[in-house]
Image: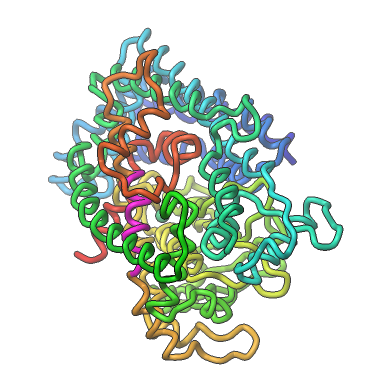
Amino acid sequence: MTEHFVPAFDVAMLAHIEDLEAIASSTTNDFESILGAYDRAGSLLSKVAGVYGNYTSSLNTPDMQLVQTEMAPILSRHNSKTYDIPGLFEKIESMYQVKDEKLKSGDWTAEQSRFAERVYIKFVRMGAKFDATTKAEYADIQAELATLQTKFRQNILKDEEEWELVLEETDFDGCPADVIAAARQVAIDKKKTEPNVYVMTLGRSMVEPFLSYSTRRDLRKTVFDAFSKRGESLISPDRDNLKIATEILRLRKRQAQLHNKGSFADYQFEDTMAQTPEAGMKLLNDVWEKSKDAAKREREMLESFVSKKGETLEGGIQGWDWRYYAEQVRLAEFNFDENDMKPYLSLDSVTNAAFDVSNKLYGLKYVKRDDIVAYHPDVNVYEVHRNDKLVAIFLHDNYARPYKGSGAWMSELRTQTKNLAPGTVPIKAIPIVLNNNNFNKGSDHTLLSFTDGVTLFHEFGHGHHGMLSDATYEYLASTSVLKDFVELPSQLMEHWLSEPVVLKEHAKHYLTGEVLPEDLIKRFKAAELFNEGFNTIEYTSCAMYDIALHSLPDYNDDFDLAKFEQDYLKEIDMPQGIIMRHRPAHFAHLFGSSSYASGYYVYMWGESFPFSV
Ligand SMILES: [Zn+2]
């Protein structure tokens, strides 16, 4: 399979360039022959890139990683070239210049005018106005960034893959049965089939429950230390992501300089709703001060719990203690244990709940197609119907497994469009949307924590964005919106899972079918906001760090990324016992690609909408 990508890309990139050259030499200068054609250009490349992107994120085997290393700079150079086809920018600019007048006269729709503007901005941001020497330097920077960012992601994947902690069943004292079962499954997958062998990995879905429930402080510390040092030469000195990230920052700085911007943050924010790093930072600062107070109160609750029990913790509450004692306090103060809810939140019932909410909100119906085989046997494929019409294909890839990136995300194999080339079969207008999660697969049933359930709903919200897209042009379809709008549909969707009406209808015991008891819902609701200070600090510190880091005027030879993290967290008075949710050496949002760099605040920006719309 992997050997097909390079030749497929060769053909597709060539076809893309030919499409663009045809536009540049077009003798007609109307919307259809310039922008209509631009929107359709490179359709073969989009197809290949969709499949490739899915493999590199969901099934990035060692073979595939070699292809990815080879292709990263080549694809980057191709991308740069598409903004430098002789005569093409002039055509794009000519469209941009007439967009207001065309809209006013009624010749163009608002969407067409918006399209002309977005493409023009993209060309300028890719350096279309630079002279030839600067263009060449810019393309070099992009290609180097692509290589470094690929390496950064692969290093995390390898660290997560290779690190292991071999344990016995008694080492899991306090842990829920599904975590123990998952650790046993990993041992079997790693061919450690002797009885009583269990393996902990660095997947978040294993680490977080272990840190929340293991009574063994020593083991919690071991797991926490390794988890927080992913990418920091944890296993091999060749995988020094701090060094790679520093190189990335220097290249981005130069990129911003070529655009006459003082910092990469200035360059990134220019094309967002927030517009300036200061606006993004202001939102975060307001939240920060309040969450520090909340975290302080939470910490006091944890400390008083510890002293009431007559325990002493050497060094006080540390990073490897907070989650554990938070669950203890939740139980003591709110009489709520998240594990009591898990049997009611099987993957099947949460998926059905998401389908039902999707149906009630948007009229979508999901029909499972067992006969369609996806790229992995665990992936479920659905036809999505609205008013008895096929509107999308939906692929649901839920489980953690080797060679799959961590986290959860939505992607597409095909984006919605109405702008098909003449003679194209109409099915090509139908989007193919994927949702990836990283849940531990249970042996019979997979039971989710409430947080896992919220993640599934969150990605479903992005899924809706792709499936319900109704744009004429692919260029504006689906999630191709300003970056700080993109988290709105997902934030709106994720709130639905905790609605009592949804829980009552769908949260049924996986063995008995019993409905989630009213009393449990009440206790869950009462405990829901406890520890939100911790969660908000974990996230907000990352978002503030990101903007601060990308706002620095330079990263000269003395610049030390590890020291900057320390100094910055001290400066903003990071509460003790909490660390950034993603530390620099594995902060893939920032260094795995450029799209979320200086843009991690968008989750908070998106969160600030649902309560105001
Ligand atoms: Zn999201």
- Closer to us: 493 or 296: 296
Left or right for 155, reference 563:
right
Depth order, front residue of 133/582: 582
Specify whether residue 20 is painted magenta: no
Q: Is residue 556 above or below residue 611?
A: above
Give the x, y percent position of residue 468: 41, 63
At horizontal 35% and vertical 66% (from top left) the residue drawn is 304
Q: Height in image: 92 above or below 103?
A: above
Residue at image point 58% right, 76% down: 346
Q: Position of residue 469 (x, y in %)?
A: 39, 58
Q: For this rendering, which residue is in front, 502 or 367?
A: 502
Q: Residue at x 32, y 10 (%)?
A: 131
Asked if one can make out residue 555 in the rendered structure from this viewpoint, the answer is yes
| Rendering quadrant holding ligand 1 | bottom left
Q: Write the start and end of the magenta stretch as one range.
A: 530-542
Asked where in the image residue 50 lies, by quadrant, the reply is top right
